[in-house]
Amino acid sequence: MLESKAKWELKHEANKEELEALSCDDIINRLLSDRGVRNEKEKAQFLEPKLAHLASPAYLTDIDKLKERVEQAIDDGEKIIVYGDYDADGVTATTIMYKALTRLGANCDYYIPNRFDEGYGLNEKAIERFALDDVALIITVDNGIADVKEIALANDLGIDVIITDHHEVQETLPDAYAIIHPHLSDTYPYKHLAGVGVAFQVARYLLGEMPDEWLELAAIGTISDLVPLTGENRIFVAHGLKRLNQTNNIGLKKLIEIANVKRPLDERDIGFILGPRLNAAGRMEDAALAVELLLTEDETEAIMLAEKIDALNKERQEMVEATVNEAERLLDEDASFIILASPNWHEGVLGIAASRLVNAYHRPVMLLTENEKTGEWKGSARSIPGFNLFENCMEVKDLFTSFGGHSQAAGMSLSKENLEALKQFLNKRVEEKYHHLLGKPVLKVDHPISLEHMTTEFVHRLASFKPFGVGNEQPLFLLEATPQQIRRIGADGQHLKLQFYQHGEMVEAIGFDFGKFAPFISQGAAVSVVGELQLNEWNGNVTVQLNVKDLAVAEWQLFDYRGKRHLSNVLPYIQHYKHNVIVSNSLEDVKEIASLENVEVMTYDDDEHFFNKTEVLYIYDLPPDLERLETILACTKPESVHVNFQATEDAFLEPVPSREKFKKVYAYLAQYDTITFNRHLPHMMKLTKLTKQEISFILRVFYELEFISVKHDVITLNRHAEKRDLAMSKTYQKRLTQSEIERVLYYSTYDELKNWLKDRLSQSSKEEISHGL
């Protein structure tokens, strides 16, 4: 048995017969239905998202007020500031809004606060500087909905503020000139736009046309902000990716080249390569670098900026690694909500580091560092599905100096004296109401499949579900099959390859960083694999692959190391499992592992009551008899058995001589009555046509039955001995027993041995049930 790393939740279940009856069409339709696509119209809109399906920005509340105020500012030559955010969503939103205003002829500039000196959102010092610079209008993008105090200051200083945002709406709304927010727009049908999506719709309304050339920016910001890739977001990303693959934006071109991204780019390239680099500018230095990259039309400047941003991303990666390593040394694994603070950490990487820890420990994480100016703790939090960070933290909002975000991610500041109270509240809240969510992460498996479903046509049809992302995750499938080959691949064997065959066709499952699990999958075991379907092209050949996300072996397993009696074959398993029992003839043979905490070392002579239930039973030596092993199996009830023994006597290969052979030796002795063994042995072998081993064995049996007497080298036949059956000899009986042990346990095939062990374990389980235990 091999336990999965995650808890699997199947949206659809089917037994073997039901699965065989399902066609690929049936599975596709179920997947569409799970995504809310239930009729032909919805299917067409999902599979072929069109720009025409975007709602009119006129449905956004206050959009007319925004347009009137912008036109007034342009007509009067008033100075406008686009006030953005330092993440990829904010950077792309800032770029779109700035481009739209300058195209309209506005006297416009942009401003993104420094993450370290100013923090997220509007800040009072910046607003005061704007007033001195005669700024008349601030338009926020991807922020502002929580900045009540700051907007009140702007009003007092004679600056109008228009908010365009998508973050959680708090109890009190700012007294802004206009607020453009999907959740505050009853008539706007789609509520999950990213900040860049809101900015795009505003730009579209201001320009009076669809600014197609900025769809690539909308796609980058939408994917990077991890909003649901459904509805309008799906449209932005689908069309934005097409634009990105033929982009004329010189900054994006150079960033793609320096990052060595191969075309065609897809949503993964944005999520894991381009987005993180744009984020790195704001995390490590100044997000204005990213805006300048997206705005520049100069190739030399674009190369310089792209190289600078790529270098910052490498620095960011190193800092994340160092932060995660230190956090793991500090954390208490028993904590329900991991909250850690260190003045040594870099504020810009705390969100990423927190996400890494959430994935590793599957519990909410908050990482904080010291704000050198205020002396407060400042940082980021990430959550697990089912625990809403925003709602729970808002219950103790008085503990924070500032707080903002949504259900799964948040940023905050708090005084140091409030940290302990926050820890106590959040740990108690998770422990009391959300403890069931902790521990193993949850994998939501879309559908079981069989090897017959794994065709190139099926994978191509699944590709029409792209772009994948939050709310439209790439389908996860469950395959239960027996691999014909299990291999570790990669330079250090860090990856796992499973090969399956169906009607002569080969399909593979590839598990990156799953190589360490290869030894825990036994020959002939049925493996349950959860993964994503993809195509693998190599030397012109196209094969279907399952990209493994998790795996398990539910059935009882036998690991066959017969003839390899060495502790090196045992140690890796003992270190992996919590409960291990090893049984041998002598404690001396296994003394090297006797001191390990998670192993019980036993001998065949130990009383059966001392054998405990275990995950793994290691049979290091052949047992004295099969009945003894059956008793140990019944006591330990192992989930898997490892056999490491070897045959030292070869009783099975040298079977008990037949009765005819016994008669030949007796007849020879009867001719002489007394013989000298060494002198007569060659003659006896020649006459009887028996080997020395056979003759020696027969003479030992005769001696035990008192058919002969032996003194030194002289053997004398006892003609008056009592008639006895050969089986009454211990030597004869031991050879029979040993031969049977070797036949069943050592010289049997893998399947024969596995079935013999399974039958004994099954029988012991039935006996327990029958006795009501």
Image (cartoon, grey):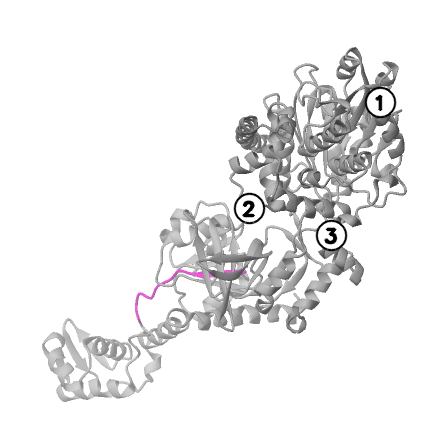
Q: Quadrant of residue 110?
A: top right
Q: Earlier in the sequence, mark 3 or mark 2?
A: 3
Relative depth, front residue between 31 and 396: 31
Q: Which residue is mark 1?
A: 75
Q: Nearer the viewer, mark 1 or mark 3?
A: 1
Q: Amino acid at mark 1?
A: Asp
Counting other residues with Cα less than 10 Å from the Cα at mark 3, is it few (<14), some (14-19), or many (20 or more)?
many
Rendered view: 558 above or below 127: below
Residue 554 can be seen in this image? yes
Question: Which residue appears at 49% of the width and 45% of the height?
Answer: 597
Is 154 one of the magenta-colored residues? no
Residue 79, image x, y percentages:
79, 19
Residue 100 versus residue 410: which sits nearer the camera? Answer: 100
Where are the magenta residues, as a range? 639-650
Q: Which dot marks residue 263?
A: 2
Q: Is residue 436 visible?
A: no
According to the image, label 3 marks what residue?
Answer: 49
- Dot 3 falls on a residue whose secondary structure is loop
Q: Amino acid at mark 2?
A: Arg
Q: Are marks 1 and 3 in contact (CB under 8 Å)?
A: no
Q: Are marks 3 and 2 in contact (CB under 8 Å)?
A: no
Q: Amino acid at mark 3?
A: Pro
Q: Is residue 467 above or below residue 678?
A: above
